[in-house]
C-alpha cells in the first residue's frame, strides 16, 4: 500500500488531477477525476483475481488504474492521445513510488493500451486487458444525465443497468 500512497501523494499526480478537473469544468459527460481512477483501479484488480492471475500484484493493478487517465487534460489542450500522454506522465511517478523497471514497463504498457480495441493488439497482457475492461465497466451510464447526448453510451456495458 505504501507505493500506492506515494502515487496519490505525489506532487505531479496531484497537479495532473487538478489539470484534468480544470479541463473538464464545462464537460457534461463522464469525468476523469480521482473517483473514476479509483473505481478503475479496484475493478482492474477484481478482474485480475477473476482471471486467476498469479504474477500481477495488487499494487500494480491499482497503480495502472490510478494513473491511466492522468494525461486526459493533454487531449483537451493539444489533441494528443490521452493514453500515450498518461503513460508518459506516469513513468516518473512510478519510479518515485518504488516500482521496479519490469513492473513499470508492464503498467505503462497497460496504460498505453487501455483505449485500444483488442483486435489491434495480439500481445495484450492480462493487466492491459483488465485495465481496458475496468475502464468500460467503471461507467454507470444507465444513471447518467448526459446519456442521451453521449456517443459512447451504446457501446457501454452499463447502458441499461448493472451487468456484473
Image (tube, rainbow, N blue to C red):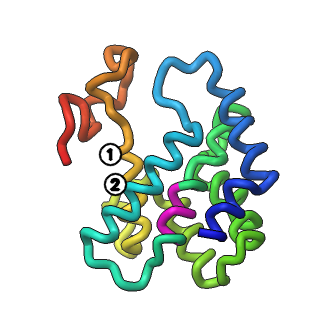
Where residue 23 sits in the image (x, y, percent)? 68, 28
- Give the secondary structure at mark 1: helix
Reply above or below: 71 against 77. below
**Residue 40 seen anywhere in this rendered image of the structure:** yes
Q: Which mark is residue 137?
A: 1
Q: Residues within 10 Å of mark 2 (few under 14, many from 20)?
A: some
Please give the name of the residue rendered at 27% of the width and 37% of the height, measured from the top-left corner: 155
- Give the secondary structure at mark 2: helix
Give the CA separation, mark 2 to mark 1: 6 Å
Point out the stretch of residues depicted in magenta.
Answer: 60-65
How many marks do you count on the picture? 2
Please give the name of the residue rendered at 74% of the width and 46% of the height, measured from the top-left corner: 14
Q: Is residue 63 left or right of residue 56?
A: right
Please give the name of the residue rendered at 62% of the width and 26% of the height, measured from the top-left corner: 24
Q: Which mark is residue 108?
A: none
Q: In the picture, which quadrant includes the N terminus?
A: bottom right
Queried whether the magenta region covers residue 64, the answer comes back as yes
The residue singled out by tag 2 in the image is 133
**Residue 79 seen anywhere in this rendered image of the structure:** no
Q: Residues within 10 Å of mark 1 (few under 14, many from 20)?
A: many
Please give the name of the residue rendered at 66% of the width and 83% of the height, measured from the top-left corner: 101
Where residue 84 sits in the image (x, y, percent)? 62, 55
Principal secondary structure, stretch drawn in magenta: helix
Circles 2, 1 touching at the beta carbon (< 8 Å): yes
Amino acid at each position: 500500500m505504501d507505493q500506492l500512497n506515494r502515487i496519490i501523494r505525489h506532487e505531479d499526480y496531484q497537479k495532473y488531477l487538478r489539470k484534468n478537473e480544470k479541463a473538464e469544468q464545462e464537460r457534461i459527460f463522464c469525468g476523469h477525476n480521482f473517483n473514476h481512477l479509483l473505481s478503475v483501479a479496484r475493478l482492474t484488480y477484481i478482474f485480475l483475481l477473476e482471471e486467476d492471475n498469479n504474477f500481477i500484484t495488487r499494487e500494480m493493478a491499482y497503480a495502472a488504474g490510478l494513473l491511466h487517465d492522468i494525461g486526459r487534460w493533454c487531449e483537451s489542450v493539444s489533441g494528443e492521445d490521452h493514453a500515450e500522454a498518461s503513460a508518459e506522465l506516469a513513468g516518473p511517478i512510478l519510479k518515485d513510488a518504488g516500482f521496479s523497471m519490469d513492473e513499470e514497463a508492464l503498467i505503462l504498457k497497460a496504460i498505453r493500451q487501455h483505449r485500444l480495441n483488442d483486435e489491434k493488439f495480439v500481445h495484450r497482457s492480462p493487466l492491459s486487458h483488465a485495465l481496458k475492461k475496468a475502464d468500460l465497466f467503471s461507467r454507470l451510464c444507465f444513471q447518467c444525465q448526459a446519456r442521451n447526448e453521449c456517443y459512447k453510451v451504446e457501446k457501454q456495458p452499463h447502458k441499461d443497468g448493472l451487468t456484473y
